[in-house]
Amino acid sequence: MYQLFRHGIFQMDAEKAHDFTIQCLKLASNPLFQPILKSLIHAPKGFPKTVMGVNFPNPIGLAAGADKNGDAIDGFGTLGFGFLEVGTVTPVAQDGNAKPRQFRLIEAEGIINRNGFNNNGIDYLIENVKNARYKGVIGINIGKNKFTSLEQGKDDYIFCLNKAYNYAGYITVNISSPNTPDLRQLQYGDYFDDLLRSIKDRQAILANQYNKICADCGKNCTRFNGK
């Protein structure tokens, strides 16, 4: 079955094949189809791992880039992954680089991707994460928009961090993609120091958010800050 499916997929343009696969997995997210898919998949069991305080059901995960917009979280989850990293996502939607931008390396069984952070924006992705039934760990990979200057780049990351914080098992800050002009400059010098400091400062604030709750619901209600 795999060889037949692979042959059909390889008759398609690489990016169209990827989009088709996402749509199939999105369909597989439907509760009516999930039992069928699960009967065909032998998902890994056991081998839980705890990394940096995050508990992963198993150490096999899906890397960012496969499901940029979180359209097929439940479909990928049915395949048995212990974690899914969705994105890279930017503050607002962008088209990415000009097509064609994905190229198969058939003999090496690989692919070259020059997408350039094409995605539907952080709000679209967060809605998909909120609606997902997947019980594993969801990581969210964040980046900056192509036309955001390096000087303002940290603002894009902070914007996405604020949006993603309450819905992600972990957050990846993507400053390594070669497909966004000058993005890698954020890895060096003052750009890196400023970005890291801003992210850590904002993380500290988000981690210490609190809600006021009523400790005594009698007449003399005392409120305290529960962290």
Image (spheres, rainbow, N blue to C red):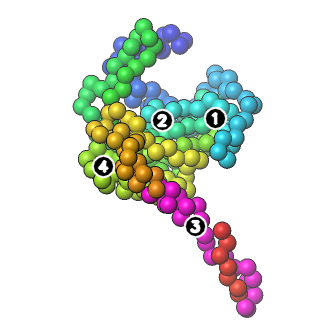
Secondary structure category for the residue under label 4:
loop
Give me the C-alpha separation between circle 3 and circle 2. 28 Å
Circles 4 and 3: CB distance less than 8 Å? no
Residue 210 is covered by the magenta coloring:
yes
Quarter residue 78 falls in: top right
Question: What residue is rendered at 37% in x and 56% in y?
Answer: 155
Circles 2 and 4: CB distance less than 8 Å? no
Q: Is residue 182 above or below residue 202?
A: above
Residue 174: assigned label: none
Pointer 4: what residue?
A: 150
> Considering the image in quadrants, where does the C terminus appear?
bottom right
Question: What residue is rendered at 39% in x and 29% in y?
Answer: 19
Label located before the other in sequence (3 or 2) = 2
Tell me if mark 1 has few (under 14), some (14-19) or many (20+) residues whose alpha carbon lies within 10 angstroms of its own.
many
With 194 as the anchor, is 83 left or right in this view? right
Residue 28 % position (x, y):
54, 32
Residue 64: assigned label: 2
Foreground disc of the pair 4, 1: 4
Label located before the other in sequence (4 or 1) = 1
Question: What residue is rendered at 34% in x and 51% in y?
Answer: 153
Pointer 1: what residue?
A: 82
Quarter residue 226 falls in: bottom right
Circles 3 and 1: CB distance less than 8 Å? no
Q: Amino acid at mark 1?
A: Gly
Res. 158 in view: yes
Give me the C-alpha separation between circle 3 and circle 1. 28 Å
Foreground disc of the pair 3, 1: 3
Tell me if mark 2 has few (under 14), some (14-19) or many (20+) residues whose alpha carbon lies within 10 angstroms of its own.
some
Secondary structure category for the residue under label 3:
loop
Secondary structure category for the residue under label 1:
loop
Pointer 3: what residue?
A: 209
